[in-house]
Image: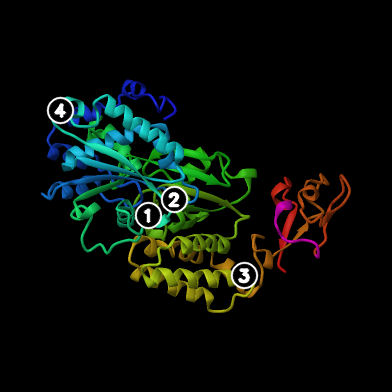
Amino acid sequence: MGIIDPLSLEDYKAAGGYEGLARALTMTPDEIIDEVERSGLRGKGGAGFPAGRKWRSAESYDAWPKYIVCNGDEGDPGAFMDGSTMEGSPHAVIEGMIIGALAIGAETGVLYIRDEYTLAREHIQHAIDDAYAAGILGEHIMGSDHKLDLSIARGSGAFVCGESTALMNSIEGKVGEPRPKYIRSVQSGLFEKPTVLNNVETLASIPTILAHGGEEYAKLGTEKSKGTKVFAMVGKVKHTGLVEVPMGTTLRTLIYDIGGGIIKDRPFKAIQTGGPSGGCIPESLLDLPVDFDTLVEYGAMMGSGGMIVMDDCSCMVEVARYYIDFLCEESCGKCTPCREGLRQMRYILNEICEGRGKEGDVELLEEIGHMMQDASLCALGRTAPNPVLTTIKFFREEYEEHIGEHRCPAGVCAALTRFAIDPQACKGCGMCAKACPTEAISGERKQPYSIEPAACIACGSCREVCNFNAVLTEGR
């Protein structure tokens, strides 16, 4: 990405594109799958299921037709890895789908792309059209006897449709709700036929594996998490954007060596990984390697690769409330544990953030969270409590301060916060007064400013613009 013109088939070929497909056409399905298994490739959408094992399972069923589906319904807040891949290298995704279709015996493929990704859909459709015109798609793939037809299905914005069975329901024109998984999609998926579903990044890795060999790919990463992973770094980090690193790279390397550290060099507080159903990792665990298995041990997950960096001005109770509010709106409501559990969590977190928390609320949040993990129908419900459970585990004192002392130490929850200016640190620049929407700050240039408590709405604008850390937070 960034080297080739994404709308040029010739550019993609000049960079080695479709060499993997050319090799795959000389191989049997078993040989293709063997190569993928040797690579150790696991699903990069977050589940981490071995791609080769999934393909082999689908290939073993004789039912026809078979389908290959690309999950481009990236809905995590702060995540844009898959969208950028489809925009920047659409042919890599298409080549991966064709190779996958050859491996399992599919002749039809669908790319399910979220509705907001207009440019990604345009680039994918342009690449599909060019591939048909060049004989790479259609009745005779690159002059062979194999065929594959690809089309795009637009997601309608439902976060739950990132879940495999809900996605397939959506493609079929049904309500986007998950199905019970006593029968796997490789046996009965799209239109009740054998279906392989991989996410964008997984499929875009396939051409490299076929072109250079699975063993070459497996040289990168860790023993159980091979290859590379693309992460979206956002939040209070100096260098935001996409970064591709070998699996097993530590959080510290990502945030400080690549991300440049925290904006204004403020203290690091936490990093939220794995999307809204991920967990919050504290500073004490910054040296953890990022892979499929390690973060799960601490209640978080790598997920699809979204990372939100937070400094000391982030309230962990409010962070948990934000994600639970998001998930509460995005839950399909099909199963009671997820539907009602999220609503009750949201109610309790709102009470805590607004100064009405009471003893026992934290323990009740933990009880609800564990119940949801045990009883929810799909992965959305089972992972939804992660933001709450990890913030309680690593930042329990913040919950206790909100409830017992009626104070938000980060100065985020307006009902529990009052701002003041440290006269020793204030340089009298006046930036805080200019940013204040209620004119609650007064003073003279080059003299310490002050805040009128009665007029302050605790919005935090003054603290955001202060370059001298002179704005302090106090309890109400």
Please say if 379 is above or below 111.
below
Query: Which residue: 30% across, 40% down?
Result: 151
Q: CA distance from mark 2 to mark 1?
A: 9 Å
Q: Position of residue 304 (x, y in %)?
A: 39, 48
| First in sequence: mark 2 vs mark 1 | 2
Residue type, label 1: Cys
| First in sequence: mark 1 vs mark 4 | 4
Residue type, label 4: Ser
Give the foreground label among 2 and 1. 1
Q: Quadrant of residue 411?
A: bottom right
Disc 3 and disc 4 in contact, CB within 8 angstroms: no
Q: CA distance from mark 3 to mark 1?
A: 35 Å
Query: Which residue: 56% across, 42% down?
Result: 261
Give the foreground label among 2 and 3. 2
Disc 2 and disc 1 in contact, CB within 8 angstroms: yes
Circle 4 residue: 144
Please say if 83 is above or below 347.
above
Query: Does residue 218 appear in the picture of this structure?
Result: no
Q: Rate crowding at label 3 as few (under 14), some (14 to 19) or many (20 or more) other CA atoms within 10 Å.
A: many
Circle 2 residue: 75
Q: CA distance from mark 1 to mark 4?
A: 35 Å
Disc 1 and disc 4 in contact, CB within 8 angstroms: no
Q: What range of the chain is rendered magenta? A: 454-462
Picture colour scheme: rainbow
